[in-house]
Amino acid sequence: MIFFGKKASVIRQEHIFGISCPSCQTNNSIHGAVVGNYGHLYWIPTIPMGRTIAAQCEHCRKTFDEKDMPSQLRDAIRPMMDEVKTPLKHFSGLFVIGGLFVLGIYTSINNDRDNLAFINDPAIGDVYEIKDAIRDYTTQKVIAVTDDSVYCAENQYSVNKVRGLAGIDQEKNYINTGIGYSRQELIKMLNADKITRVKRN
Ligand SMILES: [Zn+2]
């Protein structure tokens, strides 16, 4: 479930002189404000949703939305709008999302580079995470490396979610079934996402 909602905060406020309250007629009692509306995602302001003006009388405490204001009051407060910008903090969620996105890309590029490096220079003990159409996800562990081939022990178990692999990657689960791959085969499997990750300890 995603929590999205709308909120508002006062961006700027000041006393408005030369105007009397439309409700109690007290002179110079009006406080004007510019209000920034924003959409928030999990309570982090994310999308600015426009600005409005508001006013409150310090004497009778009555509040006025832009639509309730007599034109004289509206005209006195409106210029405040031109003096303020939408605060950057109303976008903060976008910065968070952008940051996570960049981090995600960076991590993914890093992983791809490591995976290829490990495939090109295999070592005994490397664990290949394998996506198999029939068995879903499983692992194989490198047990021997020759000039042109890599031999693996197969995990007896498979899981249907990638994050379950950590639970089955245990020494006692591996059986030597004599499976072997040429170096070229391994690169093909990596490129086809049949090998999704190479783990090296
Ligand atoms: Zn008043």
Image (cartoon, rainbow, N blue to C red):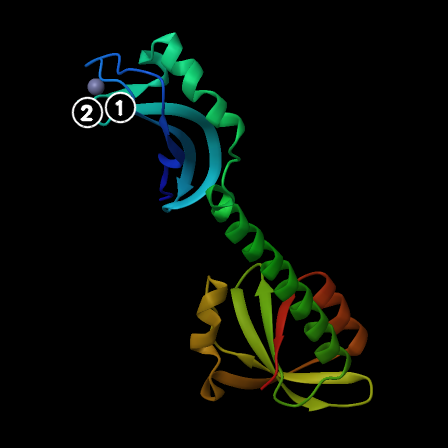
Residue 81's label in the rendered image is none
From this view, report whether residue 120 is shown above or below residue 6: below
**Residue 149 or residue 40, whichever sits in front:** 40
Residue farthest to the top, as pictured? 71
Q: Quadrant of the N terminus?
A: top left
| Percent position of residue 94, x then y | 53, 46
Q: Where is 165 relative to 134, above or below?
A: below
Residue at 46%, 20% in the rendered image: 78
The quadrant in which the C terminus is found is bottom right
Q: Quadrant of residue 16?
A: top left
Q: Residue at x 57, y 56 (%)?
A: 99
Q: Amino acid at mark 2?
A: His
Asked if residue 178 lies left or right of residue 96, the reply is: right
Q: In the rendered image, which residue does mark 1 sit on?
A: 29
**Residue 199 on image: x %, y %:** 60, 79
Q: Mark 2 near ligand 1 (CB under 8 Å)? A: yes
Give the numbered dot on residue 59.
Answer: 2
> In the figure, 88 relative to 172: above or below?
above
Give the image location of residue 91, x and y in percent: 50, 43
Q: Pointer 1: residues within 10 angstroms few (<14), some, or many (20+)?
A: many
Residue flagged by tag 1: what amino acid is it?
Answer: Ser
In the image shown, does 50 or 19 lie closer to the viewer? 19
Of residues 179 and 197, the one nearer the viewer is: 197
The answer for how far apart the CA atoms under marks 2 and 1 are is 6 Å
Q: Residue at x 31, y 12 (%)?
A: 68
Q: Secondary structure at mark 2?
A: loop
Above or below — where is 101 with respect to 71?
below
| Residue 72 position within the rendered picture, expressed as x and y whole percent measured from the top left | 39, 10
The total number of labels drawn is 2
